[in-house]
């Protein structure tokens, strides 16, 4: 967040939650929660509390490799592992470019397991006018893939 958005985040989890409640003006505290990377007791670390879907955006090549090989060294990887074992929707948005054969093999392995791989490759046919339009396209595609309604991008042909 610091490098990409010039946004300094608090290190304490409760302070982080409060920061984002304020930043996004969230009143319902159940809409957003942060957990420490080593919080093995968070709800997403167990199949008994697995959400219906998970998106890792952006997802590093290292995280893709760990997920592809069942190596859960942190909460993100463990939550993804839970999604796989519970056969829930998992979407990964790779951040690396260019992709090596190792990256591609790991993504192919995950795709064969039902994971949706969605590189942040915006369509330019809708003639974006700003970087925000490009981001909205990617986010809109992710939301649509989750089966959620979105108004960021128009449906094709409509």
Image: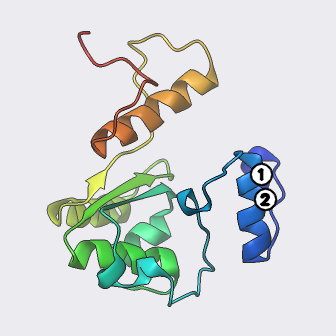
Please state which of residues 64 and 103 is positioned toward the viewer in this rendering.
64
- Seen as rendered, the residue at the extreme left is 112
CA neighbours of label 2 inside 10 A, class few (<14), some (14 to 19), many (20+): some
Q: Colour scheme used in the picture? A: rainbow
Q: Which mark is residue 65?
A: none
Q: Which residue is mark 1?
A: 22
Please state which of residues 74 and 143 is positioned toward the viewer in this rendering.
143
Secondary structure category for the residue under label 1: helix
The alpha-carbon separation of the residues under discs 1 and 2 comes to 5 Å
Q: Are marks 1 and 2 in contact (CB under 8 Å)?
A: yes
Residue at screen point 45% across, 40% down: 120
Question: What quarter of the picture does the C terminus occupy?
Answer: top left
Secondary structure category for the residue under label 2: helix
Residue at screen point 75% across, 66% down: 16
Q: Which residue is mark 2?
A: 19
Residue at screen point 30% across, 62% down: 52
Image x and y of residue 108, in percent: 23, 60
Whether residue 97 appears in this view of the structure is yes
Q: Is residue 79 above or below residue 53?
A: below
Image x and y of residue 116, in percent: 27, 53
Image x and y of residue 17, in percent: 71, 65
Residue at screen point 46% across, 37% down: 139
Image x and y of residue 127, in percent: 47, 10
Determine whether, in the image, residue 124 is placed left or right of residue 85: right
Determine whether, in the image, residue 105 is placed left or right of residue 37: left
CA neighbours of label 1 inside 10 A, class few (<14), some (14 to 19), many (20+): few
Question: What quarter of the picture does the N terminus occupy?
Answer: bottom right
Q: Is residue 4 above or below residue 12?
A: above
Q: Is residue 105 above or below residue 70?
A: above
Whether residue 70 appears in this view of the structure is no
């Amino acid at each position: 967040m610091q490098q990409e958005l010039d946004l300094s985040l608090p290190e304490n989890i409760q302070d982080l939650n409060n920061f984002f409640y304020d930043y996004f003006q969230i009143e319902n505290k159940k809409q957003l929660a942060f957990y420490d990377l080593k919080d093995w007791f968070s709800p997403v670390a167990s199949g008994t509390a697995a959400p219906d879907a998970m998106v890792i955006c952006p997802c590093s090549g290292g995280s893709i490799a760990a997920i592809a090989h069942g190596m859960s060294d942190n909460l993100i990887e463990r939550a993804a592992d839970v999604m796989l074992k519970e056969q829930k929707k998992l979407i990964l948005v790779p951040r690396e470019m260019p992709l090596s054969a190792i990256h591609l093999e790991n993504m192919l392995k995950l795709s064969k397991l039902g994971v949706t791989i969605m590189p942040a490759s915006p369509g330019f046919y809708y003639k974006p006018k700003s970087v925000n339009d490009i981001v909205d396209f990617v986010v809109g595609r992710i939301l649509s893939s989750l089966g959620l309604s979105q108004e960021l991008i128009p449906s094709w042909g409509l």
